[in-house]
Amino acid sequence: MTAATLMMVLTACSSQPPMATVDEVDLPRFMGDWYVIANIPTFLEKGAHNPVESYELNADGTIATTFTFNAGSFEGEEKVYQPKGFIRNADSNAEWGMQFLWPIKADYRIVYLDEDYQYTVIGRNSRDYVWIMARSAQIPDKTYAELRDFVIDLGYDPKLLQKAPHQLPQ
């Protein structure tokens, strides 16, 4: 995929109003591992098994991100991507630019975060990609249904939302 194609994918426009974020994110609490429970996958994530996004706050205020998964199956090759997050709104810490490829910083918005920092939803203004994530690989069905409904209410197409397969340790 060329850089120009990637730029078009990551900066797609939307006719919908801007997506509201949570009021405030305590960045140190948000750091750590988040299991992708469901998403509308990017081209990198198609077929991802055991997907986990990990965040670490850098001294300069940027966010070191490590996204790992097994490609195609639980036994598939481990893939690791390390984009860098940039806080775009320091008042809330909920709007980030996520840079996979310089100079593009893709829209990344924390649109849901429970008070215990156990569940989050990451969206984009263009409503092309979304991630439901949790601190554990499995969540209660009721919680998933509530988060799925939240995503639908944001304007996402529920037919595109896919649950991510996770293999629990034996």
Image: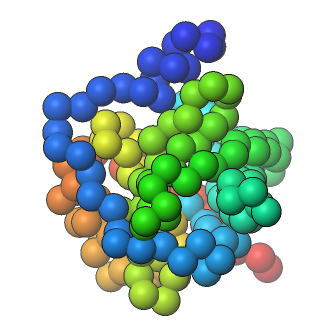
Q: Which residue is drawn at 70% across and 43% down?
A: 83
Identify whether 149 is placed above or below 46. Answer: below
Position of 100 relative to 119 (above/below): above
| Residue drawn where x is 42% and y is 87% of the image | 115
Residue lying at the far bottom of the rendered structure: 116
Residue located at (46% from left, 23% from top): 9
Q: Nearer the viewer, residue 169 or 31?
A: 31
Describe residue 152's horizontal placement relative to residue 139 as left or right.
left
Q: Name the residue: 79% across, 63% down.
A: 59
* In this view, 107 is above or below 61: above
Residue 98 is drawn in which quadrant?
top right
Q: Position of residue 63 (x, y in %)?
A: 69, 56
- Residue 147 spot, x, y in % from top left: 33, 70
Q: Position of residue 70 (x, y in %)?
A: 74, 48
Q: Can residue 135 be seen in this view?
A: no
Quadrant where the image shows the N terminus: top right
User: Can the viewer see residue 1 in this picture?
Assistant: yes
Of the 4 image quadrants, the one containing the C terminus is bottom right
Q: 44 or 116, which is in the foreground?
A: 116
Instruction: Give coordinates of residue 99: x percent, y percent.
Output: 63, 37
Judging depth in this view, the residue of 164 and 81 nearest the camera is 81
Q: In this view, does 146 lie to the left or right of 42?
A: left
Specify whether 152 is left or right of 59: left
Please name whichever residue, 144 or 88, is drawn nearer the observer in this view of the structure.
88
Left or right: where 21 falls relative to 17:
right
